[in-house]
Image: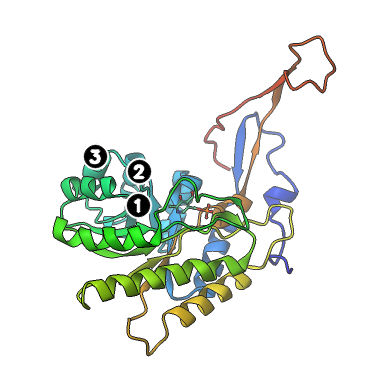
């Protein structure tokens, strides 16, 4: 296994804010810009939507906006943050599959037109609160190989995805595509292949059952690209090479279906190595008269880093 080059980033190796009052977060924005540029160069066909939930610091989001990034938003606050920084609403995708009706209406009223769903209930909510919106269905993945699998939480089975996408049109929505998430901090580049294969199978199924009337035109490959931290992980090119090979195989140039527009939603990969939180252990408390190794003790840390600029 090769490692991400060129280095473990500076904030991770030598924390530059040791003299600042805690709690504090040091963010090295150059690292974010470098990662964004590397990803754009390594996966040229994908539009990169930064997953704002990974770190919504306005300077970080503003930097990515200036670099031309699009954004994956998951709440009204994230919608407003991006719009407030001058990001046009057509660069936002609402990727959270569990939304309040009022949150959908909020995003819709501010011009967001692209939304995720993974259940019939969510589809009906979207039809009511965002009539005519473009919607993509999130598919289940196994999450194997990831430190943080999201499989039990989000995504629906492929046969159900096809049913729901076919129901979306009659509800007045535009069923434009599919998404998946291979699990966060995905260490195994071979996990992209089954996810792309599953998306291609649903795309074909929707085409067949609609007698050629419904061609899904978007494939959102989600997040999952790993951060370096202090570990050995596959290089970015191993992941992007596997993604491109899977797309070439399952959406061949002269196949019956056009290759979908690809979007990616990295969070951790873009920002995790750019920052370190410095905090302080306040007490280490032992609440039983047992050994210090007792599981009944607790450690309290100062949380909620302040927004201080460097
Ligand atoms: C819909 C969606 N997109 C993107 C991400 C970002 O994932 P990662 O940090 O693994 O890149 C997440 C994380 O939970 C997510 O739920």
Residues packed near mark 3 inside 10 Å, few (<14), some (14 to 19) or many (20 plus): some
Residue at 21% over, 58% down: 168
Q: Tell us which disc is closer to us: 2 or 1.
A: 1
Residue at 44% over, 60% down: 180
| Residue 75 in view (yes/no) | yes
122 vs 142, left or right, is left
Q: Percent position (x, y) of residue 13? A: 75, 50
Closest to the observer: 149 or 280? 149
Give the mark nearer the N terminus: 1 vs 3: 3
| Residue 29 in view (yes/no) | no
Q: Eyeballing the image, is 250 above or below 272?
A: below
Closest to the observer: 44 or 233? 233
Secondary structure at numbered mark 3: helix
Q: Which residue extends farthest bottom? A: 254
Residue at the spot of label 1: 118
Quote the CA–CA distance across marks 1 and 3. Answer: 15 Å
Residue at the spot of label 3: 101
Secondary structure at numbered mark 1: loop
| The C terminus lies in quadrant | top right
| The N terminus lies in quadrant | bottom right
Label 1 close to label 3 by CB (< 8 Å): no
Label 2 close to label 1 by CB (< 8 Å): no
Residue at the spot of label 2: 98
Quote the CA–CA distance across marks 2 and 3. Answer: 10 Å
Residue at 41% over, 68% down: 199
Residues packed near mark 1 inside 10 Å, few (<14), some (14 to 19) or many (20 plus): many
């Amino acid at each position: 296994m090769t490692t991400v080059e060129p280095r473990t980033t500076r904030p991770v190796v030598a924390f530059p804010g040791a003299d600042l009052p805690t709690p504090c977060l040091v963010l090295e924005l150059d690292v974010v810009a470098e990662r964004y540029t590397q990803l754009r160069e390594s996966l040229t066909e994908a539009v990169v939507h930064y997953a704002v939930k990974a770190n919504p610091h306005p300077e970080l989001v503003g930097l990515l906006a200036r670099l031309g990034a699009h954004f994956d938003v998951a709440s009204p606050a994230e919608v407003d943050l991006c719009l407030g920084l001058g990001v046009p609403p057509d660069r936002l995708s609402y990727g959270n599959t569990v939304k309040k009706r009022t949150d959908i209406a909020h995003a819709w009223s501010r011009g967001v037109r692209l939304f995720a769903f993974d259940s019939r209930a969510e589809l009906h909510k979207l039809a009511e609160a965002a009539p005519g919106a473009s919607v993509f269905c999130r598919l289940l993945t196994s999450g194997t190989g990831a430190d943080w699998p999201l499989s039990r939480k989000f995504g629906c089975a492929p046969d159900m995805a096809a049913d729901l996408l076919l129901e979306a049109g009659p509800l007045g929505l535009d069923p434009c595509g599919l998404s998946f998430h291979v699990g966060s901090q995905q260490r195994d580049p071979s996990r992209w292949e089954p996810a792309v294969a599953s998306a291609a199978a649903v795309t074909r199924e929707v085409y067949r059952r609609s007698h050629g009337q419904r061609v899904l035109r978007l494939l959102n490959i989600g997040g999952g690209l790993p951060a370096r931290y202090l570990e050995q992980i596959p290089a970015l090119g191993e992941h992007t090479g596997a993604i491109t090979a899977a797309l070439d195989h399952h959406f061949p140039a002269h196949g019956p279906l056009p290759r979908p527009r690809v979007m990616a939603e990295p969070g951790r990969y873009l920002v995790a190595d750019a920052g370190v939180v410095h905090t302080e252990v306040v007490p280490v408390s032992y609440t039983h008269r047992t050994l210090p190794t007792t599981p009944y003790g607790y450690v309290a840390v100062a949380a909620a880093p302040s927004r201080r600029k460097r």
